[in-house]
Image (cartoon, rainbow, N blue to C red):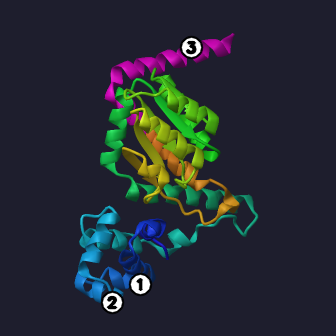
Amino acid sequence: MKSAEILFIQESMHMFKPSERKAAEFILENPQEAVNMSVQKLAEKAKVSEATIVRLSKVLKCKGFQELKLKIAYELAKSESEYSLYEDIPKDDSIQAFIQSVSQNNIQSIQNTTLVLSADELEKAVSLISNARKVAVFGIGASAIVAMDFKQKLTRISHWCEAALDGDTQVTVAANLTGQDVAFGISYSGQTKDIIESLAVAKSNGAQIISLTKSGDNPVSSLADVKLFTTSLERNVRSGATSSRIAQLNVIDILFLGVTKSNQDTHVEALERTRKAVNVFKKK
């Protein structure tokens, strides 16, 4: 069984130092035993120092090993069937099987994301977006859909936002951003070359950078002043960006509500104006 915290460890393996990786691999192979060990015992079993265990816990966004153990134990306490339900493509070709499989995947991705999404970072992101002169949101492929959703939402409350969905447009928009602006890069892998290059240009012009990627350090998040993370159960490319996209959209909804709340009366009035305008247009 792979818990959400175990998934987080797996996704972060590339950022560990050799000794930290050794400890992480032991935890992955022995999660039940690890949660019942002291830091001294785990260090002995993994053949690393106690300081390595403490460092690993902090890299994994925990205050210490005790918090890491609690998170792993919480996930291990869940029913194993909850995780075994994940399927890229259901073996059963009935519509009912599709309904259950896709819905379970999406639900689990959102639940897992709540474990790696920082409330402090979300609060910072809401503040930056609320006070920005311009918000430029960058996404390619499935992430472009998420970027367009955020643009539509911010437009509804009269926030200037541009969604740039290809490399040339992104770098062009980035070149005209200033210290008053925010560049928001969305890339589940955190490896999208065009996003990396565009955020680097925006950063060099003084813009504040927000990233939305999978959990763990990656080239996109390394450029960001504010790092937002999601996690997904997707195992390979067969299913495309399905549950990972839902997890990203859920974060976008949280951000939008946060920005709306920051100036609620004004933003609610803007929402009402846009609703009425659309209704009038449809009646013509």
Q: Which residue is mark 3?
A: 277
Which numbered disc flags the more N-terminal residue, 2 or 3?
A: 2
Q: Which residue is mark 2?
A: 45
Is 264 displayed left or right of 28 in the figure?
A: left
Residues under labels 2 and 3: Cα distance?
66 Å
Asked whether 160 or 269 is in front, the reply is 160
Q: Nearer the viewer, mark 3 or mark 1?
A: 1
Is 184 displayed left or right of 45 in the figure?
A: right
User: Residue flagged by tag 2: what amino acid is it?
Assistant: Lys
Which numbered disc flags the more N-terminal residue, 1 or 2?
A: 1
Is 122 displayed left or right of 89 in the figure?
A: left
- Residue name at image x 65 percent, y 64 percent: 88
What is the span of residues highlighted in magenta in the rendered image? 255-284
What is the number of the mark on residue 30? 1
* Residue 166 appears in the rendering: no
- Residue name at image x 56 percent, y 72 percent: 84
- Residue name at image x 51 percent, y 35 percent: 137
What secondary structure is marked by label 2? helix
User: Residue flagged by tag 3: what amino acid is it?
Assistant: Ala
* Residue 284 appears in the rendering: yes
Residues under labels 1 and 2: Cα distance?
10 Å
User: Residue flagged by tag 1: what amino acid is it?
Assistant: Asn
Which numbered disc flags the more N-terminal residue, 3 or 1?
A: 1
Q: Quadrant of the C terminus?
A: top right
What secondary structure prevails in the magenta region? Answer: helix
